[in-house]
Image (spheres, helix red, strand yellow):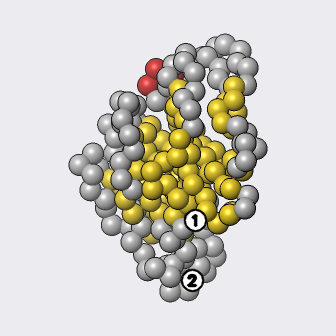
């Protein structure tokens, strides 16, 4: 599959689809997009080589307002799946994903700069499974991440979250769903105001 984007200005009509990345010899899937200031756009997706489907890398492209999409590049250290993007008012982009270990990882990219080194977000036991991370950022760059996690004693899926302040420090992981039983809680979404 290709990665395609189209934009529509406020009050305007839809724009024509634009090719962001061509699948070529790889499978492209699970894309996410974030809008920054002045209608800048950032996109991330999984890039899989059909001969080695276990080796999923994350790829990224950006577009400044009214410009063209940059060439797709791999996110350094971005090996895994389920990417989620957010942007703050300064245009810094925040990325979370499920690593192969499995862990939830985080990286950021200020406007015009490269990606930061990946940081682990979840601190659960290594045997706990994690899935479906979601990220949101406030205008100042404080970040909240939520994901589903199987670390409970019953092994059911719960929703956990952590936040990262502009100082770069992560909070402790906190279970945020209130299900006292063993029903699975999955597919979190997160937003900040």
Which secondary structure, mark 2? Answer: loop
Q: Residue furthest right?
A: 1
User: Among all residues in the image, which is located at the extreme top?
Assistant: 12
Q: CA distance from mark 1 to mark 2?
A: 14 Å
* Residue 43 found in image quarter: top right
Q: Is residue 93 above or below residue 160?
A: above
Residue at the limit of the structure toward the bottom, as seen here: 153
Q: Earlier in the sequence, mark 1 or mark 2?
A: 1
Category of crowding for the residue at label 2, using alpha-carbon neighbours closer than 10 angstroms: few (below 14), some (14–19), many (at least 20): few
- Side of 134 where 9 appears, left or right: right
Q: Which mark is residue 131?
A: 1
State the residue lying farthest toward the left.
Answer: 167
Res. 155 mark: 2
Q: Out of 86 and 26, give the one closest to the viewer.
A: 26
The x, y position of residue 187, in whole percent, is 61, 60
Looking at the image, which residue is at 60% across and 68% down?
A: 185
Q: Nearer the viewer, residue 39 or 45?
A: 45
Which residue occupies 71% across, 15% down?
Answer: 13
Q: Quadrant of the C terminus?
A: top left
Q: Is residue 154 above or below residue 173?
A: below
Q: Residue at x 50, y 86 (%)?
A: 153
SS type, badge 1: strand
Label of residue 11 in the image: none
Above or below 24: residue 186: below
Residue at left offset 33%, top offset 66%: 172
Q: In the rendered view of the protein, which quadrant contains the N terminus? A: top right
Question: Which of labels 1 and 2 is toward the front?
Answer: 1
Res 5 → quadrant: top right
Percent position (x, y) of residue 2?
Answer: 73, 39
Q: Position of residue 126 (x, y in %)?
A: 46, 79
Q: Is residue 143 visible?
A: no
């Amino acid at each position: 599959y290709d990665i395609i984007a189209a934009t529509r200005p406020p009050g305007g009509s839809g724009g024509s689809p634009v090719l962001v990345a061509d699948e070529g010899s790889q499978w492209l899937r699970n894309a996410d997009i974030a809008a920054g200031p002045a209608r800048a756009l950032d996109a991330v997706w999984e890039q899989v080589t059909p001969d080695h489907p276990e080796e999923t890398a994350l790829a990224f492209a950006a577009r400044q307002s009214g410009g063209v999409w940059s060439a797709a590049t791999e996110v350094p250290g971005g090996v895994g799946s389920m990417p989620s993007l957010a942007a703050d008012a300064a245009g810094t982009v925040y990325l979370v994903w499920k690593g192969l270990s499995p862990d939830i990882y985080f990286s950021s990219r200020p406007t015009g700069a490269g990606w930061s080194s990946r940081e682990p977000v979840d601190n659960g036991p290594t045997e706990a499974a994690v899935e479906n991370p979601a990220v949101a950022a406030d205008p100042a760059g404080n970040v909240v991440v939520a994901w589903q996690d199987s670390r409970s004693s019953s092994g059911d899926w719960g929703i956990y979250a952590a936040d990262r302040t502009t100082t770069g420090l992560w909070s402790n992981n906190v279970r945020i769903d209130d299900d006292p039983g063993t029903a699975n809680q999955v597919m979190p979404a997160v937003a900040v105001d």
